[in-house]
Image: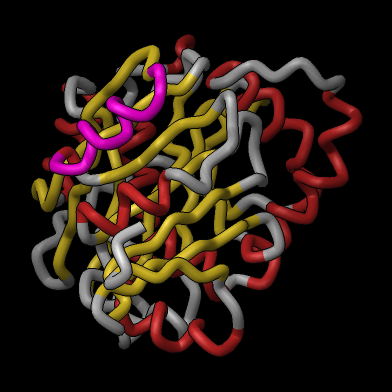
Amino acid sequence: MDTSIKLRKLSEEFTGELGSYLRVDPIYNFYPLYDLYDAVSHRKTLWHIGFKNGHLAGFLLIYRGETPPSIILDGDRDVITHLLDIVKIDEATFHLSPTLSDIVKNKFPVKSEYTTEIMSLRKGEETLYIKHDVKLLNEDHAVDFLRLMREWRPVPNDITEEVEKTMGELKRSDIYGIFTDGRLASVVQLKKLLPHIPEVCWIGRVFTSRKYRSRGFATSLVSKAVEEAFKCESVKYVGLGVRSDNIPAKHVYMKVGFKKYRDRCWLNLNTEITP
């Protein structure tokens, strides 16, 4: 190994330094920041950091809260090359800058790849379209939420095994939904972690059941999430990620005011999960 490069497992000694490193771009690094400071998420992570000439110059985050695990990495190319030597996983999704994707592809048999766009919306530039009855979901909606999520990304477990876990998630997350015909038809999740990430909130899990698409549900939900995010005085931006070729979704986001911020590369190692 290059003697100017030192690798370390993350410890309390380096948490503050890593937090400062990630906060240089809190929009692009929202998820690493969230996983660093949110107690529940942090327990599901494994972190390694790299120093070059004595300065923090890169990180590798393995999030084990899903199957297969997600690996987020960023930093100096030399540091990333050495950090990837730590990875002993046969199946994963990698999330990184397109400028670093060649390093991963040279080390691992990548099965498929996608480009995701990070989009952002600055406070004061939003245009909201809330034309439906949007509800904040709670624990009582766990089964409804699980059924809808299974349409999005099927999982093998029996639904009853996931109910308790989902009830906890609904209790601690802001997840909004629209009901129609007596069933949950569309959802959006708003992630925020004040005071650790004071300036940015994040929108995720935007999904509408195929039966109820083209009714404007997603536009109403994204608008509601943005409205709630900007009620926090410190929040200046809302971010989200979307597959670059998902034109209908991008149309919804741009209608509300989101603009492209940066690209991120999604690489599949022995899996066929899609963004």
Q: Describe residue 76's horizontal placement relative to residue 268 as left or right.
A: left
Q: Of residues 96 and 186, which is closer to you in this image?
A: 96
Who's the residue at 29% across and 44% down the image?
96
Q: Nearer the viewer, residue 93 or 185?
A: 93
Quarter containing the N terminus: bottom left
Quarter of the image holding residue 57?
bottom left
Q: Quadrant of the C terminus?
A: top left
Q: Give me the residue at 70% from left, 53% from top.
A: 169
> In the depicted view, which residue is nearer to us: 3 or 252?
3
Question: Does residue 96 appear in this view?
Answer: yes
Q: Give how far across and how far down residue 213 sits, in percent.
A: 38, 17
From this view, report whether residue 88 is shown above or below residue 152.
below
Residue at horizontal 64 percent and vertical 38 percent from the top: 66
Residue 186 picture location, percent across and down? 49, 31
> How far across and how far down the image is residue 56, in percent?
32, 77
Question: Which stretch did the figure color magenta?
Answer: 99-109
Tell me: 217 left or right of 254: right
